[in-house]
Amino acid sequence: QVQLVESGGGLVQAGDSLKLSCTASGRTFSTYTMGWFRQAPGKEREFVAAITRSGGSTFYADSLKGRFTVSRDNAKNTAYLQMNSLKPEDTAVYYCAADRSFHTIGITIERRYDFWGQGTQVTVSS
């Protein structure tokens, strides 16, 4: 079991940057693939980014490549999502998720992930 807590959300203006953090409990953080998802009002939750256990590989939603960067610090039990050039359409609740699979098959798929944080709200004003 792992518990995930997101932080760093808030209200920003279009063009601003924001860095989200996801801190995990326990001493096995490095054994989890970490994913970021988001859910905008009235829409389904969608994949944002993911990073493998060692941080050696990263994956992004095509529409977000170049603006968002996922990273992790296993010594701090924390994953990050750096978001640049934010747009109003990035407004959503952002969730981090953890999965123990060592492969990358389905890494963009929500149901792969076993553990989820409570989410943090990001609001981008125009």
Image (cartoon, rainbow, N blue to C red):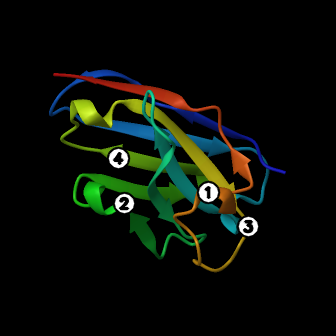
Q: Is residue 107 visible?
A: yes
Q: Secondary structure at mark 1?
A: helix
- Location of the C terminus (image quadrant): top left
Q: Going from the N terminus, do you reach mark 3 or mark 1 first?
A: 1
Image coordinates of residue 6 in percent, x first then y, are 57, 35
Labelled pair 3, 1 in contact (Cβ < 8 Å): no
- Mark nearest the camera among 3 and 2 is 2
Q: Which mark, residue 82? A: 4
Q: Secondary structure at mark 2?
A: loop
- Mark nearest the camera among 1 and 4 is 4
The Cα–Cα distance between marks 3 and 2, rounded to whole angstroms, is: 21 Å
Q: Going from the N terminus, do you reach mark 3 or mark 2 first?
A: 2
Per the image, the residue denoted by label 1 is 75
Q: Amino acid at mark 2?
A: Ala
Image coordinates of residue 34 in percent, x first then y, are 58, 58
| In this rendering, position of residue 40 left or right of residue 69 | right
Mark 1: few, some, or many residues within 10 Å (few <14, many ≥20)? few
The Cα–Cα distance between marks 2 and 1, rounded to whole angstroms, is: 27 Å
Q: Which mark, residue 100? A: 3
For residue 87, which quarter of the picture?
top left
Identified at 45% across, 29% down, the residue is: 42
Mark 2: few, some, or many residues within 10 Å (few <14, many ≥20)? some
- Mark nearest the camera among 2 and 1 is 2
The Cα–Cα distance between marks 3 and 4, rounded to whole angstroms, is: 23 Å
Identified at 78% across, 55% down, the residue is: 27
| In this rendering, position of residue 9 left or right of residue 5 | left
Per the image, the residue denoted by label 2 is 61
| In this rendering, position of residue 46 left or right of residue 64 | right
Image coordinates of residue 111 in percent, x first then y, are 67, 58
Labelled pair 2, 1 in contact (Cβ < 8 Å): no
Q: Amino acid at mark 4?
A: Gln
